[in-house]
Amino acid sequence: MLPILARSGRLVRSPLLQRGGLRYTSSAAALNDFGKHHVTNGLGRITEGVMAKGSGSYVEYLDGKKMLDFTCGIGVTNLGHCHPKVSKAAADQCMNIVHAQCSIAFSEPYLRLIEKLLPAMPHSSLDSFFFWNSGTEAVEGAIKMARILTGRQNIISMQGAYHGRTYGSMALTKSKTSYSDRQAPLMPGVFSIPFPFWHQHGLPPSAPPSVLTEQSLYQLHLLLSQQTSPKDTAAIIVEPVLGEGGYIPAPKEFLEGLRAVCDQYGILLIIDEVQSGFGRAGSWFFIEQSGVKPDILLMAKGLANGFPLSGIVSRKELTDKLAPGSMGGTYAGNPVSCAAACAVADAFREEKILDNVQARSKQLFAALDGLKDDQTLAPYILDVRGSGLMVAMEFASSEAPGAAFDPSTPKGLSVKKGMASRVAKKCIEKGMLLLTTSVYEVVRFIPPLNISEEDMKKGCDIFAESVREVVRES
């Protein structure tokens, strides 16, 4: 028999602490303490407790606490927790075949998923797919493909970018030094340019996109002249909406500029939509809003609504040059995850998810802009930005990186570092999960794409109350 946990008047079986023939009853708090003792300290958490259940826009903890989830597991459960169609598709697939290894044979869900995704591709040339498990693996695969296909080594990424934490992707990640702390030497051949984000050019938040684009593209041309010759450069990789770096949509003209440079020199353009894809930024993929054609498109997170799955999509004329066996992985394109992803694609169309994204995005931006326009709060709020339901608010700080040289630093206003984390903590205390991001004072909103108007209002009200309390305390 397994030990038992009492929760909300019910008996719940738990596998906790059954060793040496001994069994005993434990509480939710004890299970949490067990996790603290036995789970690596390298994992951080924003809440105490054990998450036990999820439904739609809410999660429940083992102690009965219920939270409105504005994180979606960092942009993963885009259709909410345990979407009925997605969960059923996965459960049904489990009764057919769970592991159909991709190097042994095709699996039907793998191929059905390609059928469903082809019409959603941002360009008709994207017709060759490889499914893997995680976003960082997709990035690793893209690096490998780019080097094979071009015969070149060097990769250019963006300042502030996040592409993962495995060794190749970690070298491309430029959002925080904590991800690569004490890991040198990293993968060689990586160079970076400033993303068109006002912080990165030492300009005020009011700097027009055209100026930011001009400065970033100038730095790209300088880089190709001074540090990595075009004939040595395999690819440029970019998040069309900078994620971990602060939720900044790339201007259309910047993406067009990258495409032009890649076309001029035979460099591959890798578009990383691991976070911004699948409706998160307002369309199937944000890159389609610019009309720019990727050579390689990366996806993950919302692809399977919580089941581990990522995708690398390119042109068949390119992938036909890859030797069989050069790509692969034991769990790559797992049929259960692919079946879930098929249901996700169906739900997007049947439930008109993108229509809801547009409506709820307007609602969220109206609420955040209302706070920014409030004269009692305005000195503390630098920026409201994003696209779709990938939205951020940045707070002022006199202790931000490079504050002494940054024109956005508030003059005559002492705002200590950590305002974003204090606001997020207040939201958690009030029953809503919210995350911070970047080296700046930024909170990010990642609610379910099918969130109701009522729950969006509830979240906006919690956030507004939290901001006002933190400002009063400041």
Image: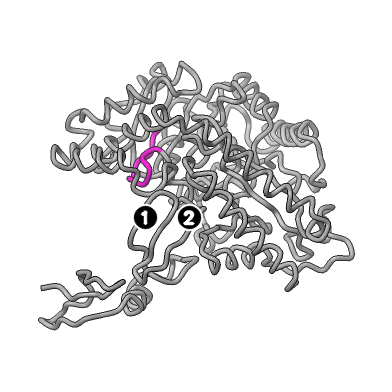
Q: Which residues are magenta?
A: 303-311
Label for residue 69?
Answer: 2
User: Which residue type carries mark 2?
Assistant: Asp
Cα distance in 3D space between marks 2 and 1: 9 Å
Tag 2–tag 1 contact (CB < 8 Å): yes
Name the residue located 83 percent from the left edge and 61 percent from the top edge: 404
Which label sits on residue 54? Answer: 1
Q: Is residue 189 magenta?
A: no
- Front residue of 6/294: it is 6
Q: Position of residue 469 (x, y in %)?
A: 69, 68
Question: The residue under label 1 is which amino acid type?
Answer: Gly
Horizontally, is 160 left or right of 397 in the view?
left
Crowding near pointer 1: few (<14 within 10 Å), some, many (20+)?
Answer: some
Q: Main secondary structure of the magenta part?
A: loop
Q: Residue at x 48, y 57 (%)?
A: 68
Dot 1: element: strand
Q: Residue at x 20, y 37 (%)?
A: 101
Q: How is the image coloured?
A: one colour
